[in-house]
Image: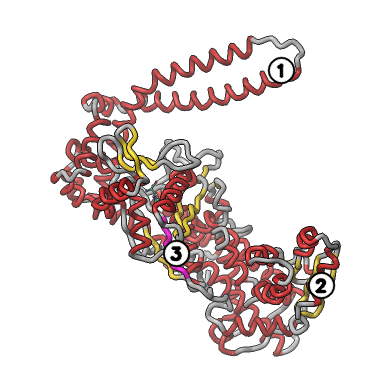
Amino acid sequence: MKLLSEIQARFKPALESLVDGAEQVDSLLGMIKPTQDDKFGDYQVNCAMALGKKLGKPPRDIAAGLLEKTALDDICENVEFAGPGFINITFKDSWVTEQLSLANQDDKLGVEQVKEPRTVVIDLSSPNVAKPMHVGHIRSTVIGDALANIHRFIGHRVITDNHLGDWGTQFGMIIYGYKNFVDRAAYEKNPVQELSRLYRYVRVLMDYHSAVKKLPEAEDLKRKQLDAVERVQAEDYGDNKGKLKQQKKDLQRLKEKLVVQDELIKSYKSAVEECDPEVAEVAKQHAGIGQRVLEETANLHSGGNENKALWDEFLPYCLEDIQRIYDRLNIKFDHILGESYYQNQLEGIVKELTENGLATESDGAMCVFLDGFEAPMIIRKKDGAFLYPTTDLATIKHRVEEWQADSMLYVVDHRQHDHFDKLFAASKLWGYKDVEMTHVSFGTVMGDDGKPFKTRAGDTVGLEGLLDEAESRALQVAKEQNPNLEDSRQQEIGRVVGLGALKYADLSQNRTSDYKFSYDKMLALRGNTATYLQYANARVHGILRKLDTDKEKLKASGNAVLFTEKVERQLAIQLLRFDEVIYDVLVEYKPNLLCNYLFDLAQLFARFFDQCSVRDADTDAIQKSRLQLCGLTSRTLTCGLGLLGIESLERI
Ligand code: ARG
């Protein structure tokens, strides 16, 4: 299935004769795009303008020259010049239907396989275990999984690796909690739940102390901010417009700061004042808890037997806890190599970097100073502790040496961009020059109020609760849509539609922006939602069943597609663009482009179905052709959803 790649291949020699270098040619080929409106044909070649400027010639002459050197007759019906130098291309119907039959025969719907497969390591999910997984973790998990599926689909060798945070302070917290507050009976009955309670309990105690300490500092700062407001307000600038404008701006800025400060004070106050009196009493008894937790962590890291034994005991429980979520989301990893895996290599890494002069001592710490960054990357603290970047350096070495990675994608929150910029820069200096490293960053999940998504009580939203809620709401939708269906079927629909909606809600957003989470929106039967796509797909299956056929039979039949109505041709072109979209997703790692494509496809199918009767088609050949379009639409929807990690249903 290759519309765009075919035209690009045709124009390539002509472009190569005009400019030097593969990069320039590729950038010009990138200017070949599908038309916005099919009255301008199917595709538009837009590079004549850029070339005209570059070569100092009228774009129309360039366009004419390009066409002269490009053979299109066998595939194009019509080639027209438009405007200052656009070339509008319309494919021959016979060529389109021929491409469609090729796609039909192919299990991968004609999507081309890469000529030079690469080993792509995808770092995804990577939660800090021993803390409950929350809503933020869903983004890395589902975006990473979709990117892995898509890379694999076109023939790359993919290795997914869940780089668990399994060695951090959170273990110091549960070890401290376990030593001081464990409820034995509860632990024996349900260790995961008890460990998670201990984590939260220690968190509350630590927050209490940090709030007690920070509250007076925060109030002091607020007083200073209020003074500053007064000072700015007191200035009298008469009618000096410039100064008055500046004064207004300054006030605005200061007031914004005050709002943030007030929020902070409120949160400290509530940690102290709204703390359960019993808990507050315990907190007072554990005054040094913050320091003690750090000590427990340090003890674990330096090989303290007791803490290491506890860690060995706890870790499987923590893993079991997150595995339950991965099972529900149907996410599998090739490797789960957490931070702990690399601990015995860190000393060697620091030594190597010191010996080759990359790391130098500063204030007792070992640092890598990098051009273009204000602060260095610290790889060993003064007290001897290794840090997050040290482990990441060891991870890179492992991925290159053991797995021969050509490219590594880190699907991680945008707030870590400074860490990755430094990590990548340091790795290049270290010698890993030929490995492509990309931080596939993403924004925050927001609630309806436009603030980071929290529960009513102000906690981060747990992932498990989110999955439960999505499933139960989808079940309600399923019951409304089809009240007579047996219960177990409705449950199954609720599960598939609910989880699919949740994943899609995330994937259909431009990953770099924050997005507002809404159950209602994601489960809506209209609009760009998985629910809409699921119902559209099930509808196609329904048509096929009524006419006593299915996708496999249609694939095997090899029946030709004919165009009797305009919309049939439009649907065919959209189906054939699947290949182009798959490759587009990987340019900037944006699965939302695939979502948009599937949504357009489903909408176009709805139009086709409205305008072209399948059951009462005029002739047998037309009916067969329309069935073929139905089969291909459903296969494309199912395949596309599958690449996004979303199951589809034949009946809803
Ligand atoms: N565990 C980290 C966190 O929750 C994310 C790890 C991302 N991957 C990595 N190789 N640094 O913030």
Mark 1 or mark 3, whichever is nearer to me: 3
Q: How is the image coloured?
A: secondary structure
The answer to whether any part of residue 488 appears in the image is yes
Q: Amino acid at mark 3?
A: Asp
> Residue beneath label 3, please?
406
Q: What segment is highlighted magenta in the picture?
A: 118-124
In primary-sequence order, the first of circles 2 and 1 is 2
On residue 258, the disc is: none
Residue 84 vs 266, above or below: the answer is below
Residue 350 vs 34, above or below: the answer is above
Q: Secondary structure at mark 2?
A: helix
Q: Answer with left or right where residue 95 lies relative to residue 196.
A: right
Residue 395 vs 357, above or below: the answer is below
Mark 2 or mark 1, whichever is nearer to me: 2
Q: In percent of the image, x 82 and y 60: which residue is there?
A: 56
Q: Amino acid at mark 2?
A: Gly
> Residue beneath label 2, please?
65
Q: Main secondary structure of the magenta part?
A: strand
Q: In percent of the image, x 68 and y 85: which residue is there?
A: 98
Q: Secondary structure at mark 3?
A: loop
> Residue beneath label 1, please?
244
Does the segment drawn in magenta span residue 474?
no
Q: Answer with left or right where residue 419 lies relative to residue 204.
A: right
In primary-sequence order, the first of circles 1 and 3 is 1
Q: Which residue occupies the foreground of this view, 501 or 477?
A: 501
| Label 3 within 8 A of ligand 1 by Cβ | no
Mark 3 or mark 2, whichever is nearer to me: 2
Task: Determine the image quadrant of residue 4.
Answer: bottom right
**Residue 391 pos. (x, y %):** 33, 49
Q: Quadrant of the N terminus?
A: bottom right
**Residue 11 pos. (x, y %):** 72, 73
